[in-house]
Structure formats: C-alpha cells, structure tokens
C-alpha cells in the first residue's frame, strides 16, 4: 500500500507538471500605475511642499514652491518665514557648479567601487566550491568560467573608476586654486507668501501646479534642497488606468497576442482576469526581483495587461508595485 500511494503521488506530480508545461504559459508581472515624473527645466531650490506622499491632487493644485537657483542665490533661510538671499559675482558661480558636479561624480563612482568590491568578495568565496562541483560534474564548466570572467570584469571596472576619480580630484584641485573671495553684489529679502521680489522675477518664489489628476507616490527632494533640472522632484500616478506589466519568455511569443485574456494570481492568493492591450516586439531585461542570481540577464517580451472591467481597479490597487503570476492557456 505504501508503495502504491508513493507511486500514485509521483504520477500525480508528473502529470500536474506536464499539463502546466504543455498546455499553459506562465510569466511574472508587476502591478503598476501610469506615472508622471515632475521635473523643472532649470536648476531650482525647493522652498516647501504643499502635498505629501499619498495625497490626492487635481489639475491646478499647488504641489510645491521653489525659486530658480541660477546664481547660487540663497545665503540664509529664516525659519520664521522670511528669506534672505545673497548673490555673488557670476564669474565664480560656474566654478561652484563644476565643483558640485565633480564631487557628485566622485561620490557615485565610490558607490560603484564599493558594490563591485563586495561582488568580487562574494564571487571569490564561491570559487573553490564551484571548482569542486565542476570536477565532480555537478556543474558545467561554463558556470565557473562565468564567475571568473565576472571577477575580471569587475576588477577592470574598479581600476577604471579609481583612475577616473584620481583625474576628478586633480580637476577639483585646479578649481579650488582658481577660487577667490567672492564679492557681494546685492542683498535682497523676500517672503514666501509674498511671491518674491518684484524687481527680479528670477529671484521670486514660484509655485508649481499639478498637470494631472492623480496621487503623489514619491517625493525625491527634501525642503530647501537644490533640484537640478535633470533630477526628478516627485512622481504622480494617475488613478486610472492601472495595469500589470508582464514579462513573457521569448519562446512563448507564438501563444499570446493583443486581446487575449489571461489569469492573474496576486500575492494573497486571489485571482483576477486581465486583457493584453499591447505588447512590445523589442525585448526587455527581466527586473532584478525576478532575475535569478549568478545567471546571465534574461531578456523577455513585455506586455501591458489591463483589467477586464473597471470594478477590478479597487482590487488591483492594493497590490501596487507587487509581483504577480500570469498564466494563459496555450490553445
């Protein structure tokens, strides 16, 4: 009896695996909103935010106040509401901006060097184990070669970044030698509520209004920080439409098309139906949370899946940015 029960379980498992493999395709996905990134066309300093993360906004609602930071104008900030700005000669402003850009680049390079060094240390701890497993034919030899090539690539990247930082330090030294004591050109005062100084609109406090209806999902800049024109200040997502971005294996491309219905399984075990509205012929790298560690990056076919009915939005909303499983019958 024990033998028969065990054999039956084996056949049931094999049958379940075969049915899912032969008749169904399976993919990973993420629940997303359509986001709008808020940036400015000039460098600015954030004075204050009128909305916080999670707040609902309408078109025309004030999001934050700011002032243009073209000439490094801000000297003192009064917590009582008054702002005193001091501007310096423009001939030295570009040096300060160049120094900031160079120091930022050095800091980013240091982060990359630290991460690469940590990966190298992790790989080196596995080299001996991988060599033993290759000798025993447990792993293919190309797996060991992949790790060795990664160590070589990361070491080369570290050397390159270190050399680049040394050059950047040299440029910083040259810039520091060029700096003289700046001469104060003018001092002006304004009030956050008063809209700035009337003689110079560039120094005035401005308000940024929401371009869409939606919800504030992220605020990337803190109060009184400088936001460069290339940096994102906040993100707003539209309330609808909500969708799932699915990542299908390339060999499954023949089994799905626009308009097909798929089954979506959420992390809590609940299920919902979705329709493929569009997919992209260009391949996309699989997101890090789905990518298997120590394996080459997998490229997939990305598809946008929308709810079958509007009533499903309230269900999908609870799983924003969470991972889901997508299944579809092949035939």
Image: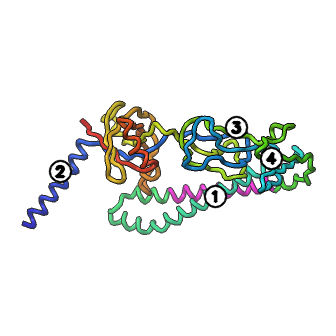
Taking the image as shown, residue 266 lies to the left or right of residue 154, namely left
User: Do residues under tags 2 and 1 come within 8 Å of each other at their CB atoms?
Assistant: no
Give me the disc on residue 191.
4
**Tag 4, which secondary structure?**
strand
Region rendered in magenta: 150-172
Whether 295 is drawn above or below 39: the answer is: below
Q: Earlier in the sequence, mark 4 or mark 2?
A: 2
Report the residue at 78% width, 52% height from top.
81
Q: CA distance from mark 1 to mark 3?
A: 36 Å
Please give the residue where the numbered disc 3 appears in the rendered image: 41
Q: Determine whether 82 is above or below 116 in the image.
A: above
Closer to the camera in the image, 218 or 65: 65
Q: Residues within 10 Å of mark 1 (few under 14, many from 20)?
A: few
Residue 93 in the image: state x and y as whole percent.
84, 46
Left or right for 63, reference 139: right
Q: Secondary structure at mark 3?
A: loop
Quarter of the image with the N terminus in it: bottom left
Are dots 4 and 2 in contact, CB under 8 Å?
no
Query: For the image shown, how many numbered marks are present on the structure?
Result: 4
Residue pointed to by mark 2? 15
Q: How many residues crowd around disc 3 within 10 Å: few (fewer than 14), some, or many (20 or more)?
A: few
Q: Secondary structure at mark 2?
A: helix
Query: What is the spatial separation of the Cα atoms under label 4 and label 1, in whole angstroms?
Result: 50 Å
Image coordinates of residue 136 in percent, x first then y, are 33, 66
Q: Quadrant of residue 127?
A: bottom left
User: Mark 4 or 1 closer to N-term?
Assistant: 1
Which callout, 4 or 3, points at the residue further toward the start of the chain? 3
Residue density around tag 4, few if under 14, some if 14–19, many if 20 or more, within 10 Å:
some
- Give the CA distance from mark 4 to mark 3: 24 Å
> Marks 2/1: CA distance?
53 Å
Q: Residue at x 13, y 63 (%)?
A: 6
Q: Which residue has dot 1 on it?
A: 159
């Amino acid at each position: 009896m024990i033998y028969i029960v065990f054999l039956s379980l084996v056949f049931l498992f094999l049958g379940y695996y075969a049915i899912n493999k032969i008749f169904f395709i399976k993919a990973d996905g993420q629940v997303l909103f359509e986001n709008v990134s808020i940036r400015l066309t000039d460098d600015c300093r954030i004075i204050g935010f009128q909305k916080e993360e999670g707040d609902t906004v309408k078109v025309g609602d004030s999001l934050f106040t700011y002032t243009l930071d073209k000439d490094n104008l801000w000297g003192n900030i009064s917590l009582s509401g008054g702002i005193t700005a001091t501007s310096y000669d423009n001939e030295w402003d570009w040096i300060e901006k160049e120094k900031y850009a160079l120091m930022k680049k050095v800091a980013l390079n240091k982060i990359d060097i630290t991460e690469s060094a940590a990966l190298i240390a992790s790989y080196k701890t596995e080299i001996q184990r991988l060599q033993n497993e290759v000798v025993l034919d447990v792993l293919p030899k190309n797996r060991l070669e992949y790790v060795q090539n990664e160590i070589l690539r990361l070491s080369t990247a570290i050397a390159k970044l270190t050399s680049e930082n040394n050059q950047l330090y040299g440029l910083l030294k040259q810039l520091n030698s060029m700096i003289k004591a700046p001469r104060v050109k003018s001092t002006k005062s304004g009030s956050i509520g008063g809209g700035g100084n009337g003689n110079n609109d560039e120094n005035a406090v401005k308000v940024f209004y929401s371009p869409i209806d939606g919800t504030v999902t992220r605020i990337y800049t803190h109060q009184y920080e400088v936001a460069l024109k290339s940096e994102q200040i906040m993100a707003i997502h539209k309330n609808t439409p909500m969708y799932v971005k699915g990542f299908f294996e390339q060999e499954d491309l023949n089994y799905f098309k626009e308009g097909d219905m798929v089954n979506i399984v959420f992390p809590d075990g609940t299920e919902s139906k979705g329709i493929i509205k569009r997919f992209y012929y260009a391949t996309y790298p699989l997101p890090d949370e789905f990518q298997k560690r120590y394996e080459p990056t997998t490229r997939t076919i990305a598809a946008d899946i929308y709810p079958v009915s509007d009533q499903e939005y309230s269900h999908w909303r609870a799983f924003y940015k969470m991972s889901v499983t997508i299944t579809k019958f092949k035939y």
